[in-house]
Image (cartoon, grey):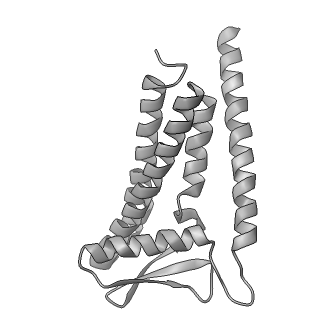
Amino acid sequence: MKKHKNVLIFLIKFFVTYALLFVIYNVYLQKTQQKEPIFKTAPITTLVADQSVNVIGFFGYDAGAYQHKKELSVKLLINGKYTARVIEGCNSLSIIILFNAFIIAFAGSIKATLLYSIIGSFLIYVINVLRIAFLAVMIYKYPNQQEFLHNIIFPAIIYGFVFLLWVIWVQKFSNHKK
């Protein structure tokens, strides 16, 4: 019975945390995104696109990020060619919410949980910016591979990294480590 109680507690903590953070994030999106009179993405989405452009530029490409005029996205251009777009789902906040819900559900000490949450969220954000830059360059160089790159490689990078962070958390820092 205790085994089932622990699973139930984990699920409750996970879903309550996830729901709370998701509601906060949606309020943020409603307050910052706009469709009329012109489209405007949330500041975090624009920031991720701009930082991705900086990474692309670091590797010698002429890159730019521009608000799409007909949708909630930021267009990424490489050497003047529209290569990719950054939408709300690309800004990493949804996955950071998922990451933190798990960390809180498998909590360790308050200090460890808070520090790991902050450091992990920062690392996920950085990996996300790097993967967007990588994806944009790969699509620019290999446009015929766009579907494979976006649907397989792109998610594998971020979800694989988050999974690795979760494994490290459970094995090293949570109260449930063996």
Residue 142 visible, this angle: no
Residue 168 in the figure: left or right of residue 114: left
* Viewport quadrant of the N terminus: top right
Displayed quadrant of residue 163: top left
Number of callouts in the render? Answer: 0
Residue 58 in the figure: left or right of residue 159: left
* Point 66% across, 26% down: residue: 10
Residue 149 image offset from top left, x and y in percent: 37, 64
Residue 53 visible, this angle: yes
Residue 146 in the figure: left or right of residue 13: left
Q: Residue furthest front?
A: 111
Residue 117 image offset from top left, x and y in percent: 53, 41
* Point 57% across, 63% down: residue: 89
Comparing 50 with 67, the one in front is: 50
Residue 154 in the figure: left or right of residue 70: left
Comparing 50 with 87, the one in front is: 50
Residue 33 image offset from top left, x and y in percent: 69, 74
Give the answer, above or below, for where 63 lies relative to 104: below
Comparing 137 with 23, the one in front is: 23
* Point 62% across, 82% down: residue: 71
* Point 43% across, 24% down: residue: 172
Give the answer, above or below, for where 99 lies relative to 95: above
Give the answer, above or below, for where 100 lies relative to 155: above
